[in-house]
Amino acid sequence: MSASQKKSSKYLQSPKGTRDIIGEDFYAYQGLFEKFQEVAVYYGFQPIQTPILEAEDVFLRGVGEHTDIVEKEMYGLKTKGGDKLVMRPEATAAVVRAYIEHGMHTLPQPVMLYNYGAFFRHENPQKGRLREFRQFGFEIIGTPKSIADAIVIRTIVDALEEIGVHDMCVELNSIGDPESRVAYIRALTNYYKKNVDAICPTCKERLKTNPLRVLDCKDDRCQPIKLAAPESLNHLSVPAKKHFKEVLEYLDSADIVYKIDHTLVRGLDYYSHTVFEIKAIQPSTEDGEDAPAPLTIAGGGRYDGLAKILGSKKDIPAVGGAIGIDRILHTEGIKTPKPRIMKKPKVYFIQLGFEAKLKSLSVIEMLRKANIPIMQSLSKDGLGAQLGAAERLGVPYTIIFGQKEAMDGTVIVRNMDNRSQETVSLEDLPKHLKGMK
């Protein structure tokens, strides 16, 4: 082959780190999207799609200038008019930008959104990690309540279980509120400065620009230092401790197995309070070799300060997470679902009181398994606020689950059109709802 032919053939291939999705591979991506979309709708999330191109500042300000994404991985371009754009490297900052731009604060809060699409980062392609990659994300914007953190984690866990990922590990930590973060960064920085001669050059630089990211280091020489580093949980403020404790209680009540990873901080500046990752445990090989390291297939956390960083006049508390679709397709034992048609929710779930909240996730999961999609706002406390949200969203029926009902194993089903209502046992609820027109 001549030099000109070799050069020509290079441009007839997909760029490094990207791939063509053809035939059964296409159906695999589409089936995963529709399965995750189905779970999202059953939990009350609504769709959003942001542009692939965003203003550079959305990520410079939102993600943080001293992160790998901004310093090394963003694909940028300059328009003929001089505007600096980037191909979106992640979803959360873009979704919050859209929330602000479209005045979603006027909607019933919190706003629960799901998104899916391609994202772009210039990094070394490897198994399950491409330069053009796809994620399915969940965002709950407009509530500081700890149950929102639990909803995001529970929704992702359920979505993964639906496709056969049963052997997984939920790892989480809390980096607290701004008060906690200042105290923790001070302690972490002082500790690493005492060990500065033993750490890698990258960590030395991160110590100056973004100290939390020293805990992301994979360099062997830094591992003993990292394992003995101060723990963020020991520097949480009283409100931050309460928030994290409640998250763990909700996960316990939902029978979600988890472990606390004191080195988990995630790599983006906007995170606060809860951060988490979900890893798929890889099986041992047939020849008796050790099992591969767990594969991180999902992650996320709370980002209460991001909206203000992007231009909101006030902080808008929020939490979210995303599943790596390409990573999923490299996970052993998954069941790739066939694409199918979605259903529109006709029921709004209302809970009243702490005991009802603790059992709410189980009730929602029971309805989801019965193929009954709902809408809900578990972070709200008052009946009036939740009924108002149901009316504004035009949902024809509501389920009211209060303290008494939680003890009795019943719910109240209300017709939002004529205000009639009846008490139904939890056992009979799926059949009763399916019989409603």
Image (spheres, grey):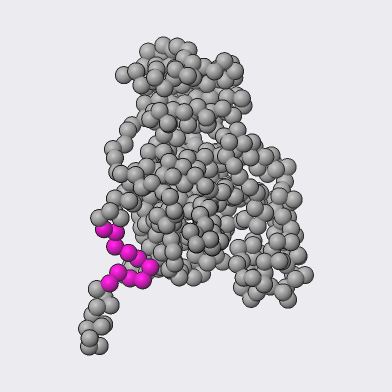
Residue 247 as seen in the image, left or right of residue 332: right
What is the x, y in percent for residue 52? 36, 58
Instruction: State which quarter of the image contains the C terminus.
Output: top left
Say if residue 250 shows up in the picture: no
Counting the numbered discs, the total is 0
Q: Residue furthest right?
A: 194
Instruction: State which quarter of the image contains the N terminus.
Output: bottom left
What is the x, y in percent for residue 434? 36, 21
Residue 252 as seen in the image, left or right of residue 70: right
- Residue 334's place in the image compared with 395, above or below, is below
Residue 136 as seen in the image, left or right of residue 269: left
- Residue 202's place in the image compared with 85, above or below, is below
Which residue lies at the image location 47% right of the left edge and 46% below the top edge?
165
The quadrant holding residue 10 is bottom left
Q: Which residues are magenta?
A: 13-22
226 and 378: which is toward the camera: 226
Q: Residue furthest front?
A: 287
Query: Is residue 175 magenta-colored?
Result: no
Which residue lies at the image location 53% right of the left edge and 61% below the top edge?
288
What is the x, y in percent for residue 343? 32, 33
What is the x, y in percent for residue 150? 56, 39
Say if residue 365 shows up in the picture: yes
Which residue lies at the image location 40% right of the left edge and 65% below the top edge?
131
Query: Is residue 19 magenta-colored?
Result: yes
Which residue lies at the image location 62% right of the left edge and 39% below the top edge?
247
Overall secondary structure of the magenta stretch? loop
Residue 385 as seen in the image, left or right of residue 262: left
361 and 315: which is toward the camera: 361
- Residue 137's place in the image compared with 398, above or below, is below
